[in-house]
Structure formats: C-alpha cells, structure tokens
Image: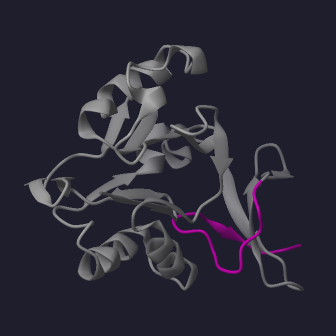
Amino acid sequence: MTTIAISDGFIVADGLRTWGSEIRGRAHKKIRVVGSLIYAFTGLVPMQEPMIEWHRAGADPTKLPHGAADDKHGGWTLIVIDKDGIGKYTDGCPYLERFDPPIAFGAGQDYAIGAMLVGASAQHAVEAVASLCNHTGGEIQVVDIASVLGAARKNGAARSQTKNVITGTWTKRDDKAAKFAKVAARPRPFSRMRRRSAT
C-alpha cells in the first residue's frame, strides 16, 4: 500500500512495504530517478522495475510485462515525470494520461490531495496520511523534480511568475520567449521561482 504526492516541484512517497497484513519493510524506494526521468510506482514491488523498463522500451500497451495486464493483487500505477509534466499508466489503462499538480496516487491519495489543496506540501501531505492510515508509513522519500529534469535555474532558462492583479492568480512565464507558460493559473505563488510585477 502506498501514498505518492506531487506538489510545488516535489514528488514524495512513503516507504512502507506490505504483503496482506504483514509489514515487509519500511524503507522501500517507490521513486526511481533514471537519467532525466522520474518514476514512481504503486502496486506489487516486483513489478516496479519491469514496468520502468517497459516504459523505457517505448511503453507499448501490447508488450506489457508478464502479469501486468492481469494483475489480481490490487492493480498498479506507473507515474512518469518528464519535461512535459506528470503522466501515469495503470493496469486498467496502459496509455499515457497527463495530470497537473497537486496530485496524489495510491491508497492514501484522497487524503493527500485534500491536504495539499488546503496548503500542505507534498511531504506534509504524505506524513499526514501516515499518521492516520495503516497503509502508509516508514521512511519518507522526497525528490526535487527540477533538480532531476535539469532545473531551469541551473540551465540558464529565464522563467518567472507574475500575478494577475484582477483575479489574484499566479501564472508561470517564459521570459526568454516573452510568453506565458501553458499551465493553469493558481491562487498562490509557485515556489522557488522569481516573481515579476504585472505590467
């Protein structure tokens, strides 16, 4: 059982590993960094690496690893974060589906999304689920998404955010291209991003 949460530039997962009612470990790494991609997985632990390899080989729905198309143990979700954003594949739909943060996956996803929507960080959201539910716990794994994907601040990309003085929402901006990014405006500032005045 698992809780994985993504918000404000971080992906966070608990480390609890179970089999039925038995705890098999408390420090399982449910998030994997492979090159410039971030993978996270909910489901049977032995399926994690084969599913990552499946994605790296092209994510062909007709070539799922053995057992993935007929998972009788609660299903699986493969989360992939790349330069285009957050995506997932599941046992019920092995085709890419995109999401905007805040978003969460796994048994504690509803609790985690609720916590993030009222201002909690992804880490605090997972910690809150762990304090309430027996399906989430152990060591908390935190990965900085920007540092893996090649942070804009490290690569010299000029990105900032600006506030709409009428609606009060914030929107990312590509300063080099002088265009607003294709992301939804938000009611609070993005973390770790330079602010600029609305003109």
Residue 121 placement (x, y as % from top left):
44, 74
State the image quarter where residue 85 is shown. Answer: top right
Residue that appears at 34% across and 44% down: 73
Res. 49 in view: yes
Asked if residue 47 is positioned above or below residue 176 in the image, the reply reads above
Asked if residue 54 is positioned above or below residue 77 in the image, the reply reads above
Residue 156 placement (x, y as % from top left):
57, 41
Is residue 145 in the magenta section?
no
The answer to which of 177 and 94 lies nearer the viewer is 94
Q: Which span of residues is magenta-colored? A: 183-199
Q: What secondary structure is the magenta-colored segment mainly?
A: loop
Res. 36 in view: no
Residue 16 placement (x, y as % from top left):
19, 58
Q: Quadrant of the C terminus?
A: bottom right
The answer to which of 23 and 156 lies nearer the viewer is 23
Residue that appears at 65% across and 57% down: 100
Is residue 184 in the magenta section?
yes
Residue that appears at 25% across and 81% down: 131
